[in-house]
Amino acid sequence: MKRKRKLTGIPVLIVLGLWFLWAGKVSASGMFFPFVADDWILIDSDISSVYSGNQNGGETLAKETMAVPVNYDQKITPADREILYKVVSQECDTCYEGSLAVISCMLNRMESGKYPDDLMDVVTEKAQFTAYYDRNTGTYPYLSRKPSKECIAAVDDALAGKRRNLPSYILYFRSSDYNSLKGYKKYGKIGDNTYFYKEADR
């Protein structure tokens, strides 16, 4: 009976070497290692798929630029900041990114020229944020809200000009139940909200 030859170390090294060459080529194309250093700063543009579990990521573009963060710390009073914590928390407090998207959208509105140029005027504008005032119930839902540490951190980061996770043209959102909105295009889902935009705003 003939004995089977044992596999020596040389063929194994050759196979491993070929595998590493293949992996290197695939990673260079962005298929094998999607989070390469050059793309890391761009990953926020597809944050909707990362944090919502939505593999499609809405209609976000892979290399889309987020709104430029601006420091508004000195323009927000402590009392107004507390209101913002609660309103943002009421709109979305499922995670840091979800809360950051809400405050990013609010800041986008303030800077857009289509809404008031004061953040608190944006938040309290009639029939805009039901977390502040719900006209159907005639109540102010945010009053009893207790924001999480993640929500507070997201609001503080946005106001301090550290970070935003939406492009500047994203001015609208609805609860995650909305997959479409007449007259608007879908950007993607972040936290428990779906974000929309008008083509004219891009």
Image (cartoon, grey):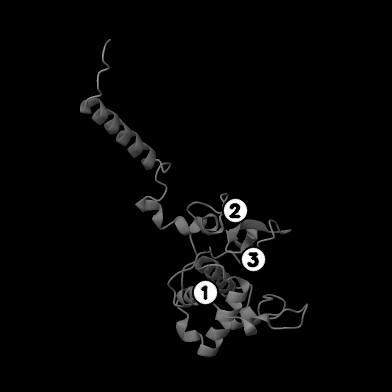
Query: Measured from the top left, where is residue 33 in percent x and y?
Result: 39, 45
- Label 1 sits on a secondary structure element that is helix
Q: Quadrant of residue 128?
A: bottom right
In the rendered structure, the answer to whether residue 40 lies left or right of residue 52 reads left
Is 30 rendered above or below residue 37? above
Q: Nearer the viewer, mark 1 or mark 3?
A: 1
Residue 181 lies, in percent from the top left, at 71, 59
**Badge 3 amino acid:** Phe
Mark 3 = which residue? 173
- Circle 1/circle 3 CB separation < 8 Å: no
| Earlier residue among tags 2 and 3 | 2
Residue 158 locus on image (x, y percent): 48, 74
What residue does disc 2 label?
Answer: 58
Secondary structure at badge 3 equals: strand
Q: Residues within 10 Å of mark 3 (few under 14, many from 20)?
A: many
Extreme-top residue of the structure: 1
Mark 2 lies on a secondary structure that is loop
Q: CA distance from mark 1 to mark 2?
A: 23 Å
Which amino acid is tagged 1?
A: Cys
Quadrant (top left/top right/bottom left/bottom right) for the N terminus: top left
x 37%, y 42%: residue? 27
Count up the numbered dots: 3
**Upstream in sequence: badge 1 or badge 3:** 1
| Residue 119 in view of the camera | no
Q: Which quadrant holds residue 94?
A: bottom right
Q: Amino acid at mark 2?
A: Gly
Which of the marked residues, 1 or 2, is nearer the chain's N terminus?
2
Q: CA distance from mark 2 to mark 3?
A: 13 Å
Residue at (46, 71) in percent of width and height: 69
Residue 192 is left or right of residue 152, and the answer is right
State which quarter of the image contains the C terminus: bottom right
